[in-house]
Image (tube, coloured by chain):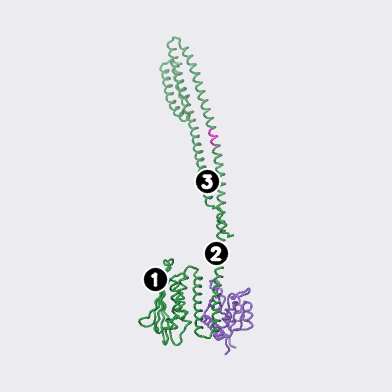
Amino acid sequence: MNPHEAKTTEPKLEPIVIGTFIILIALVAGIAFFSDRSTRKFFESMLWVDEIHAVIDVAKDMELDLREAESALRSYIIGGDHLKRDEYLEKASACVDLHFVKLRERMDHIAPESGSVDRIESLLRTRIKLLNESQRQYESGQGLQNEVLQRGSRSMEQLVEAFQEFANQGHQLLTSRISERQKEAQTMQTAMAVSGIAGAALAAFALLLILRGLANRREAGRQMLASLREKEVLLKEIHHRVKNNLQIISSLLVLQSEKLKDSGAKEIFAECGERIQFMASVHQQLYASGNLMRIEFGKNLSDIASNLMRSHVLTGCDVTLETRVSPLKLDIDTSQALGLIATELILNSLKHGFKGRESGRIVVELLSEDPCKLIVVDNGIGLQGNAGIGSSARMGVGLVKALTRQIRGAFELVNESGGGTRATISFPLPGDLKTGATP
Amino acid sequence: MDPLRILIAEDEAVTATALELELRSMGYRVAGIVDTAEDVVSAADQLHPDLVLMDITLKGVLDGITAAVAIRGRTGIPVVFLTAHADETTMQRAVFSGPFEYILKPFSHTELKTAIETSLKKQQTESEKRSASAPTA
């Protein structure tokens, strides 16, 4: 089984990692929420304690002020000065007014529903009023002060009860507050601990998945590299085999041509060898370029022309070659066909174009305009005296026409005005190569 | 003057036979045809050819480059590589293993002729240099 196929059946890690991280982020957000709530409750508790202290301070201040006012009362009892009695009453009333305003403000923060403060204030004011009434009765000498004193005693009992109630309420409030805070603290501790443990577990899980993903990727990369190397070796072997086979075909032609008596037939075998050479050079360029889709045909054409000139040196005729080749990248099929066409045209010029001449010139042009053109021009004897091209008994023109049709091109063979022949192959670029054409 | 003798190391029989024919047509004599690296080294020792035409891929454990280095070291006989391998690594190995000529398969008659002549010329120049620099008695 292909190892890459096995990989595709495994679940994708990305959604799992993303899901894990989303949960992890939610947990961290939860911990942050609980932490914020806990901090706020802590500060609220501190403020509450401060408020309690403030109430105690107001109560103490009120006690001190009332004690100070009592000094006037003592002066009145000792000296009988009515003004001192009035001073006491005034100070005591002012003290109650002032401190109960403060006390009520504080109590609003602690226990707004509680009515104990109002009751204590009312009883305290009643107590002061009864005290004043008792003194006035005493001063009038009518002996009615006892009845007022009895009412004062009841008022005092009620005041003690109110204070007791106030203290009990405070105690209950404190107890419930502590209990509430303990429960909250416990809940938050549990929530934070669970979130922390779950977060750590998820982080470890995510880390494990990421590491596994990285290991898988590394392994896949290693397998791909191994596969690539395997293919490179295979390609190298195929290339070697193809070239060896072409060599064997070329060698067979050499061996078979040795048995031939006819020089014309021997020449045909030699030309076949040259065509095999050209095909091998296309193959070589394809392999060397590393691009199996297209090759630089311009360079290939120059090589073909130079090789043919070297292998077909005419006796008694000095033929020169001129190449004007534009860079043009072509697919393998078009390159192969054009290479064979160029071989035929150059061979025809060499074999039939310069009969009876001492010198000559062959120009090979490749134009990358649209349509592209391959032009082979010679300044030889022209078509009238060119038996080779006119009579297509050999591959020559017939092959050129067939190959031109194959690349959907047009073939034109004309006499040059100054002598010689001009062969033009016009061909369109294959659609997918148009953008890759080098100007 | 006796024709120059060339030893062929090629494991493809058809190619070796065609080479023999081509060499004869060029005026050379074929000293022998072998198909392994081990055989070509011992044949070079025994036959003392003027040149060895060596395929890089041969039968046996060793390859043509190793055999060429051994022959060059033991006898100084010039070697021309014939190879269908044109990859960078093989060519670098062939070029850096010694002053050897090489031609790529499939090769033409002209390419074969030129490579042999260049290699023999190089060998001759080296021999002349050695003779000139050798201390005279």
Would you identify the image quadrant in which residue A138 lies? Answer: top left
Q: Quadrant of the N terminus of chain A?
A: bottom right
Q: Which mark is residue A409?
A: none
Q: Which residue is mark 3?
A: A23
Q: Colour of chain A?
A: green
10 Å crowding of disc 1: few (<14), some (14-19), many (20+):
few
Residue type, numbered disc 3: Ile
Q: Report the residue at 50% width, 74% height from top.
A: A279
Q: Which residue is mark 1?
A: A371
Q: What stretch of residues is rendered in magenta?
A: A180-185
Q: Which residue is mark 2?
A: A228
10 Å crowding of disc 3: few (<14), some (14-19), many (20+):
some
Q: CA distance from mark 2 to mark 1?
A: 39 Å
Mark 3 lies on a secondary structure that is helix
A376 horizontally vs B85: left or right: left
Q: Colour of chain B?
A: purple
Q: CA distance from mark 2 to mark 3?
A: 40 Å
A138 horizontally vs B102: left or right: left
> Considering only vertical position in the picture, is A110 above or below B103?
above
